[in-house]
């Protein structure tokens, strides 16, 4: 064995009692051990450390306001239908399934003027929806999560050789 990829859990990555520690401490190693943190988990960590809570928090609270309140989902759908919008609703966001945020953010960004109008009509004026810097942050967050989602799906795809996986990672790094 020449390499180990872990999710960073102490049972795997611990220096003394983890799997990596046990491999590194073995005296019969002719080849140095290469240790990687799983790319998919790194994406999850990166998504949590982007410091975009100001954008994501408002998206989540707005989506929850539209979708969770008993009197809001139907009028919102009717409004979108009346203006012949491409989309029929906003997607829920689930923190557990962070890759799902791609759909939520993309749809929210596309529906921003309609959401702003609906929220204003409901007495929930959001000044951020008019702030160009906030809109730029929202667009960036939507784009970067979409790129991360694409790479994640490519890495989880059917059996692939290591060179193809390396191309996916290199392409992502080039885009970012």
Image (cartoon, rainbow, N blue to C red):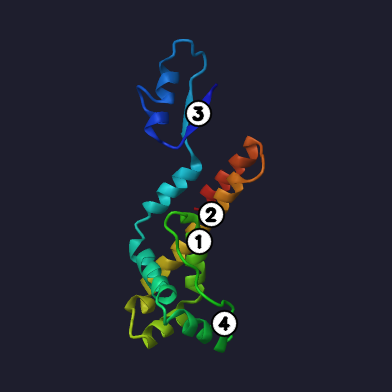
Please give the residue where the numbered disc 4 appears in the rendered image. Answer: 85
> Residue 122 at x, y = what percent?
37, 85
Residue at 52 percent across and 59 percent down: it is: 146
- Per the image, label 3 sits on a secondary structure element best described as strand
Measure the alpha-carbon separation of dots 4 and 1.
20 Å
Residue nearest the observer in this picture, 130 or 119: 119
Please give the residue where the numbered disc 1 appears in the rendered image. Answer: 102
Measure the alpha-carbon separation of dots 4 and 3.
49 Å
Residue nearest the observer in this picture, 66 or 163: 66
Q: Earlier in the sequence, mark 4 or mark 2?
A: 4
Q: Are marks 1 and 2 in contact (CB under 8 Å)?
A: yes
- Per the image, label 4 sits on a secondary structure element best described as loop
In the rendered view, tell whether residue 67 sits above or below residue 99. below
In the rendered view, tell whether residue 129 sits above or below residue 82. above
Disc on res. 4: 3
Q: Are marks 4 and 3 in contact (CB under 8 Å)?
A: no
Q: Are marks 4 and 2 in contact (CB under 8 Å)?
A: no
Q: Earlier in the sequence, mark 3 or mark 2?
A: 3
Disc on res. 20: none
Q: Earlier in the sequence, mark 4 or mark 3?
A: 3
Please give the residue where the numbered disc 2 appears in the rendered image. Answer: 149
Q: Are marks 4 and 1 in contact (CB under 8 Å)?
A: no
- Per the image, label 1 sits on a secondary structure element best described as helix
Q: Earlier in the sequence, mark 3 or mark 1?
A: 3
Measure the alpha-carbon separation of dots 3 and 2.
23 Å
Q: Are marks 3 and 2 in contact (CB under 8 Å)?
A: no
How packed mark 1 is, by other alpha carbons closer than 10 Å (few <14, some 14-19, many 20 or more), is many
In the rendered view, tell whether residue 74 sits above or below residue 35. below
> Residue 98 at x, y = what percent?
46, 55
């Amino acid at each position: 064995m020449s390499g180990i990829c872990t999710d960073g859990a102490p049972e795997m990555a611990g220096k003394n009692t983890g799997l990596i520690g046990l491999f590194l401490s073995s005296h019969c190693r002719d080849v140095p051990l290469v240790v990687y943190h799983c790319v998919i988990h790194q994406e999850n960590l990166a998504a949590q450390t982007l410091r975009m809570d100001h954008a994501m928090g408002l998206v989540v609270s707005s989506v929850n306001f539209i979708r969770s309140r008993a009197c809001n989902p139907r009028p919102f759908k009717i409004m979108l239908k009346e203006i012949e919008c491409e989309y029929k609703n906003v997607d829920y966001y689930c923190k557990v399934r962070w890759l799902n945020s791609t759909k939520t953010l993309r749809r929210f960004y596309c529906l921003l003027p309609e959401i702003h109008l609906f929220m204003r009509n409901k007495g929930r004026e959001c000044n951020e929806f008019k702030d160009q810097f906030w809109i730029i942050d929202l667009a960036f967050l939507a784009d970067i999560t979409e790129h991360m989602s694409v790479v994640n799906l490519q890495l989880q795809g059917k059996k692939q050789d290591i060179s193809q996986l390396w191309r996916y990672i290199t392409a992502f790094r080039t885009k970012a």
